[in-house]
Amino acid sequence: MRPATPASKTFHSIWRVVSRIPRGRVASYGQIARMAGLPGAARTVGWAMNALPDGARVEGRAVPWHRVINAAGRISPRASETVVGRGRQARRLRGEGVRVSRAGRIDLGRFGWDGAQAGASAPGKGTLAVTAGKGSAGRVPNWSSHRRA
């Protein structure tokens, strides 16, 4: 078996965070990057989502790609998708009870994930335990409610 490359380790850490987003909640690319220990790497999260194999599972959980949106609270068009692809993401979110406007906008105050496990409320507060390596775990603050100066 081939050892994992650093990029694949990074993608797996991102997918691990995304796999924890509860049904009916969304998170931004930047928020996922921070929670994965990669502050400022929102584009890397986008690349990881693009590289996600169909039906992928992490630690036994599905990776709900459709729950990741941009920082403005909108569905971002994928390079390989058209308006139809955005419709697919919106349909999945609506099926979970997330209100998505016709323009693809989602109220992050109402539907944003705070980083806690399933049943999360109060967007923008809390932390998520992230495995940083073999047997070590750290706490990564969720700064999703804070704006950069």
Image (cartoon, rainbow, N blue to C red):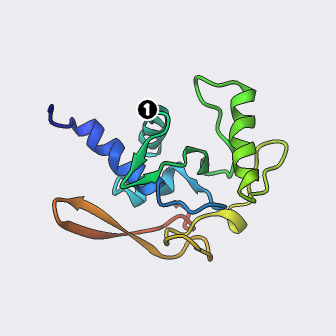
Quarter assignment of residue 81? top right
Residue at 62 percent of width and 60 percent of height: 23
Residue at 75 percent of width and 59 percent of height: 97
- Quarter occupied by the N terminus: top left
- The three-letter amino acid code for the residue at tag 1 is Ala
- Work out whether 98 lies above or below 110: above
Answer few, some or many: residues within 10 Å of disc 1's Cα (few below 14, many 20 plus, some between 14 and 19): few
Total number of numbered discs in the rendering: 1
Q: Position of residue 141 (x, y in %)?
A: 41, 70
Locate residue 65 relative to residue 81 in the image: left or right: left
Q: Position of residue 67 (x, y in %)?
A: 60, 51
Q: Is residue 40 visible?
A: no
Residue at 65 percent of width and 32 percent of height: 77
Residue at 37 percent of width and 56 percent of height: 36
Q: Position of residue 32 (x, y in %)?
A: 47, 54
- Work out whether 55 lies above or below 139: above
Residue wearing tag 1: 51
Disc 1 secondary structure class = helix
Q: In this view, which residue lies farthest toward the right?
A: 102
Q: Is residue 62 visible?
A: yes
